[in-house]
Amino acid sequence: MSFDQQQFISEPKQVGILSTANSDGTPNCAVIGSATMPAEDQLVLALGDNRTLRNLQQNPQAVFIAYKEADFLPAWQGVRLYLKVEEIDYNGELKEQRVAEITKNVGNQAAKMMVAAVRFSIHQTRPLLDFAN
């Protein structure tokens, strides 16, 4: 990639889309503004008590897409991360860290809505636009 995907994902104002499905395969997409990549093979985000969190409790597979628009589609930058839940933390250090970052970057109101932090392993990474596959 022509950019550092860890820095790209972890930018405080970067927004992405997390796609999940429940145990019967019903899909859901959610706009996520709390993602960070503490390592090349990990994604961590905070979630409220919502459909996305319930889906991840039932089905650990997800896809996260982050992008930045450009004047024409082939110039867009972005990444698709294929994920598996490794941990859902409701009261521990991982949640505290994400809530502290959200408080700092977005504010206390958004941070108060977060009930869990989710750590994913990244199983595959693809560019946003992958014309070869």
Image (cartoon, rainbow, N blue to C red):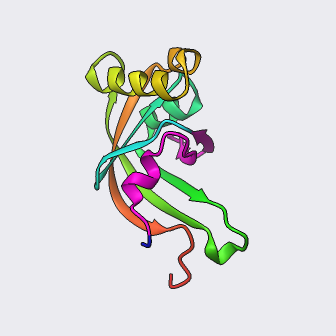
Residue 35, located in which quarter of the rendered image? top left
Judge whether 105 appears above or below 32 on screen. above
Indicate the position of residue 84 as horizontal and vertical percent values: 36, 48
- How many numbered discs sit on the rendered protein? 0
Indicate the position of residue 57 as horizontal and vertical percent values: 43, 32
Give whichever of 70, 50 is nearer the camera. 70
Asked if the stretch drawn in magenta spans residue 4, the answer is yes
Q: Is residue 106 left or right of residue 117?
A: right
Residue at 72 percent across and 74 percent down: it is 72
Indicate the position of residue 62 as horizontal and vertical percent values: 47, 49
Q: Is residue 31 left or right of residue 94?
A: right
Instruction: Find the residue positioned furthest to the right.
Output: 71
Q: Is residue 48 left or right of residue 87?
A: right
Residue at 56 percent across and 48 percent down: it is 16
Indicate the position of residue 39 as horizontal and vertical percent values: 27, 49
Q: Quadrant of the N terminus?
A: bottom left
Residue 15, located in which quarter of the rendered image? top right
Give whichever of 27, 77 is nearer the camera. 77
Residue at 44 percent across and 72 percent down: it is 2
Judge whether 127 appears above or below 22 on screen. below
Residue at 50 percent across and 19 percent down: it is 111
Instruction: Find the residue positioned furthest to the bottom.
Output: 132
The span picked out in magenta is: 3-32
Judge whether 92 appears above or below 105 on screen. above
Q: Is residue 37 left or right of residue 78?
A: left
Asked if the stretch drawn in magenta spans residue 17, the answer is yes
